[in-house]
Amino acid sequence: MSHAKGVFQVNLLPQSLADAEADKALGRMTIDKTFSGDLVAASKGEMLMAGTGVKGSAGYVAIERVTGSLNGRQGSFVLQHSGTMNRGAAQLSITVVPDSGTDELVGLSGKLEIIIADGTHSYEFDYSLAAAPHENNE
C-alpha cells in the first residue's frame, strides 16, 4: 500500500434538480477541486444530498473524476463518495471506482480520507497500483 497526502481547494456550486418540484430537503451541486501535494490534479464531479428535520443529520453521495499526477504517475481515476451525518457524527467513505484508472494509473485502488481543520481541506490517500487485468475477448 502506498500513501499520498496534501491539501485541496474545493468549489461547490448549487445546481437545479432534474425534478423542479422536488422536496426542498434535496440538493445537487457540481464539484471543482484542485489538489496539491503528492496528488497534483484537478477534479470535476457531481453531488446529491439530503437534509432532514433533525439538526446535524444529512446524507450525500458524489462521483468525481480526478485528472493529473499521483506521486509522479499521470492519468485519471474516479472517486465515489458516500457520507452521512447522524446528529453530528460523521461517517464518510471515499473509494476509487474499480478499473477507473487510466494511463499510468491503470489498476489503481484505494481509499481517500478528507480532513478539515482550521478552514483547510487536506487529504490522506492510501492506494495501490496492481497490474492491469487482461480483457477476455472470447
Image (tube, rainbow, N blue to C red):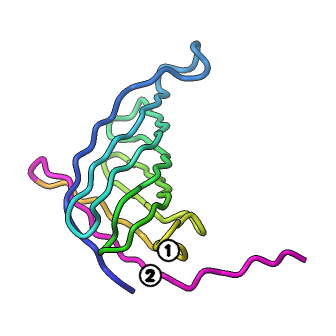
Q: Secondary structure at mark 1?
A: strand
Q: Relative to the observer, which residue lies in front, 19 or 37? A: 37
Q: Is residue 22 left or right of residue 87?
A: right
Question: Which of the 4 image quadrants contains residue 94?
Answer: bottom left
| Residue located farthest toward the left when viewing the structure as drawn | 118
Q: Is residue 41 above or below residue 32?
A: below
Say which residue appears at 20% left-offset and 66% top-offset.
37
- Residue 85 is one of the magenta-drawn residues: no
**Residue at which label 1 appears:** 109
In the displayed structure image, the side of residue 20 where residue 104 appears, left or right = left
Type of the residue with mark 1: Ser
> Looking at the picture, which amino acid does disc 2 mark?
Ser
Looking at the picture, tell me which residue is in the foreground, 55 or 121. Answer: 121
Residue nearest the observer in this picture, 1 or 59: 1
Whether tag 1 and tag 2 are in contact, CB under 8 A, the answer is yes
Q: Is residue 121 left or right of residue 137?
A: left
